[in-house]
Image (spheres, rainbow, N blue to C red):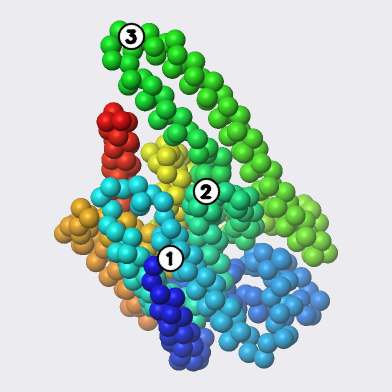
C-alpha cells in the first residue's frame, strides 16, 4: 500500500490546478454548454434558469428542455442563496465528487479479490503502484479537468454512482453492505432516467449470487475424482452426486430467489420514494403529466437530444434517416445494448466484479449521449487489466488502438469547433472522428474482454488441477 501522504499531495495539487484552470476559463460563455462534456438538460445554465423561474413562482418543468431531477434541483435552489459565488462553490463540490470517484476506483483496484486468484498476476506492490499511477492520471487528465470546470452535473454524478455500484459489487464490501446496491442503483435511475436500465440484470446477479456455489461444486468434483474406476464413476455419479447436486441447487436457488425479490423490493421502494417526494414538491403537475414528463417522454425518445452532435454515432444516424423510423432505430439500439449484457453475465458468472466492469463499459459505450469523461472511465478500467498481469504486453495492435483513441479524443473538440463555429467543415468530418474513437474503443474492449475471459478459464483449470493433485 502506498503511503497516505502521497494521496494528500495529489489532492492538494489537484485542487490548486483546477482552481487556476477555472479562473482562466471563467470568461468563456460556451464552456457550460459544450455537448462533449455536458448532458442536455443537465447543464449549469439550465439549472440557473430553473432557479430563476422558481424564485419567480414559475415551475421550471413547463419546458421539456429541463429534465434535471426534482430533488437535486430543490437542493441546489436552497443552496444557491448561501453561496456568494455559485460557480466557485459548485466547482468545489464537483471537484470533491470527482475526487471521491477516483479514490473509490483506487480502493476498488487495490482490494480486488480476482487479481489475487490469478497465478500470473504481478505482486501486490506492483499492482498498487499501477493503481496509483492510473489514479493520478484520472485526476490530472485534461478531460476530467475541463469537465469539472464546465460544471457538468450529469457526467460527474453518473460517474460517481457507477463507481459506487462497482465498489459495492466487490466481495469484500458485499456482505453487510449488500443492500446499498439496489439503493444506489435507484438513485442512478432517478437521476439519469432509463439510460442505465441495462445494469439491472448484472446488478441482480451480483446481489443474489451465493458464495457457496463454487465451494459446493469443488466438493462434488473431489468426491467424483476419488472414484478410480470409470464404471464405478458412472454409477456413483447417478446414485450419489446427482441427488446431492439437485439438493444443493434447490437450497441455492431458494437463497437466490429470495435475494432477487429483496433487490427488486428495495429498488422499487427507493425509486417510488424519490418520485413521490418529487411529485409533492411540484404542486402544479398532475400524476399523468409527471409520468409523461419523466417516463413516457424519455422512453419514446420524443426529444432532440439524439440530434445534438456528440461522441455517439446516434446523432448522425438520426439526421440521415426519415423521422418515422427514428423510434424504431432507437429501440433497436436499446435492445441490442440490453441483449449484449447476458453473454457477459454467462462468461464471467464466477467473478461478479468483472461482470460489472464489462457491463459498465458496454453501457457507457452504447448510451445515447456519452461524454468525454465517460470514455476516460472506460480507458481506466481497461488499462488496469492490461497493466496488471505478467504475460500481458502492449502489442503493436493494442498500442495502436490506444494511440488512435487518444488522438481521436484530442481532435474531436477542434473538429466540432471548425464545423459548428467557424463553418469550415461539415458533419462528415466529426462523424469520421466519432467512428475512429468508437471503433478503436470497441476493439480495445474486445481485447480486454478476451484477456479477462482467458484468465477466467485459467482460474477454472488451475482449480481442477488442484483438486486432482489433492
Q: Which residue is mark 2?
A: 199
Q: Quadrant of the N terminus?
A: bottom left
- Classify mark 3: helix, strand or loop: helix
Label 1 and label 3: CA atoms lie apart by 51 Å
Sequence-wise first label, 1 or 2: 1
Quarter of the rendering containing residue 469: top left
Q: Quadrant of the C terminus?
A: top left
Is residue 71 visible in the rendered image? The answer is yes
Q: Which residue is mark 3?
A: 232
Sequence-wise first label, 3 or 2: 2
- Classify mark 2: helix, strand or loop: helix
Q: Are marks 1 and 3 in contact (CB under 8 Å)?
A: no
| Drawn side of residue 226 relative to residue 155, left or right | left
Q: Are marks 1 and 2 in contact (CB under 8 Å)?
A: no
Residue at the (67%, 64%) spot, across then down: 69
Label 3 and label 2: CA atoms lie apart by 46 Å
Q: In the image, which is nearer the foreground, mark 3 or mark 2?
A: 3
Q: Which residue is mark 1?
A: 106
Q: Residues within 10 Å of mark 3 (few under 14, many from 20)?
A: few
* Residue sitting nearer the eye, 47 or 417: 47
Q: Position of residue 292 (x, y in %)?
A: 70, 53
Q: Position of residue 91 (x, y in %)?
A: 56, 81
Q: Position of residue 279 (x, y in %)?
A: 78, 59
| Drawn side of residue 83 relative to residue 329, left or right | right
| Drawn side of residue 156 relative to residue 417, left or right | right
**Residue 385, above or below 234:** below
Amino acid at each position: 500500500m502506498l503511503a497516505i501522504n502521497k494521496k494528500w499531495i495529489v489532492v492538494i495539487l489537484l485542487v490548486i490546478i483546477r482552481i487556476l484552470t477555472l479562473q482562466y476559463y471563467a470568461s468563456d460563455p460556451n464552456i457550460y454548454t459544450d455537448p462533449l462534456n455536458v448532458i442536455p438538460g443537465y447543464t449549469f445554465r439550465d439549472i440557473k434558469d430553473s432557479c430563476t423561474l422558481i424564485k419567480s413562482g414559475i415551475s421550471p418543468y413547463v419546458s421539456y428542455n429541463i429534465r434535471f431531477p426534482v430533488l437535486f434541483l430543490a437542493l441546489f435552489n436552497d443552496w444557491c442563496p448561501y453561496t456568494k459565488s455559485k460557480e466557485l462553490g459548485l466547482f468545489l463540490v464537483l471537484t470533491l465528487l470527482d475526487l471521491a470517484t477516483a479514490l473509490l476506483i483506487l480502493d476498488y483496484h487495490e482490494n480486488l479479490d480476482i487479481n489475487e486468484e490469478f497465478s500470473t498476476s504481478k505482486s501486490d506492490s506492483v499492482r498498487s503502484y499501477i493503481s496509483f499511477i492510473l489514479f493520478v492520471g484520472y485526476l490530472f487528465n485534461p478531460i476530467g479537468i475541463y469537465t469539472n470546470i464546465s460544471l457538468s452535473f450529469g457526467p460527474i454524478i453518473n460517474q460517481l454512482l457507477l463507481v459506487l455500484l462497482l465498489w459495492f459489487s466487490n466481495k469484500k464490501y458485499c456482505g453487510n453492505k449488500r443492500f446499498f446496491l439496489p439503493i444506489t442503483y435507484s438513485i442512478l435511475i432517478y437521476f439519469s432516467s432509463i439510460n442505465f436500465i441495462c445494469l439491472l440484470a448484472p446488478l441482480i446477479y451480483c446481489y443474489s449470487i451465493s458464495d457457496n456455489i463454487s465451494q459446493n461444486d469443488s466438493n462434488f468434483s473431489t468426491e467424483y475424482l476419488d472414484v478410480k474406476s470409470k464404471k464405478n464413476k458412472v454409477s456413483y455419479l447417478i446414485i450419489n452426486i446427482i441427488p446431492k447436486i439437485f439438493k444443493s441447487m434447490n437450497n441455492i436457488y431458494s437463497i437466490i430467489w429470495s435475494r432477487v425479490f429483496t433487490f427488486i423490493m428495495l429498488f422499487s421502494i427507493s425509486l417510488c420514494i424519490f418520485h413521490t417526494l418529487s411529485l409533492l414538491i411540484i404542486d402544479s403537475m398532475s400524476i399523468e403529466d409527471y409520468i409523461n414528463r419523466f417516463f413516457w417522454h424519455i422512453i419514446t425518445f420524443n426529444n432532440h437530444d439524439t440530434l445534438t452532435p456528440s461522441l455517439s454515432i446516434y446523432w448522425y444516424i438520426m439526421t440521415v434517416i426519415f423521422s418515422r423510423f427514428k423510434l424504431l432505430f432507437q429501440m433497436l439500439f436499446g435492445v441490442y445494448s440490453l441483449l449484449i449484457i447476458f453473454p457477459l453475465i454467462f462468461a464471467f458468472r464466477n467473478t461478479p466484479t468483472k461482470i460489472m466492469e464489462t457491463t459498465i463499459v458496454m453501457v457507457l459505450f452504447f448510451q445515447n449521449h456519452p461524454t468525454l469523461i465517460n470514455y476516460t472511465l472506460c480507458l481506466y478500467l481497461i488499462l488496469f487489466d492490461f497493466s496488471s498481469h505478467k504475460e500481458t504486453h502492449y502489442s503493436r495492435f493494442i498500442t495502436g488502438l490506444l494511440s488512435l483513441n487518444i488522438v481521436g479524443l484530442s481532435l474531436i473538440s477542434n473538429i466540432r469547433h471548425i464545423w459548428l463555429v467557424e463553418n469550415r467543415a461539415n458533419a462528415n468530418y466529426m462523424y469520421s472522428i466519432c467512428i475512429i474513437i468508437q471503433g478503436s474503443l470497441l476493439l480495445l474492449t474486445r481485447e480486454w474482454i478476451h484477456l479477462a475471459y482467458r484468465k477466467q478459464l485459467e482460474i477454472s483449470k488451475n482449480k481442477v488441477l488442484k483438486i486432482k493433485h489433492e
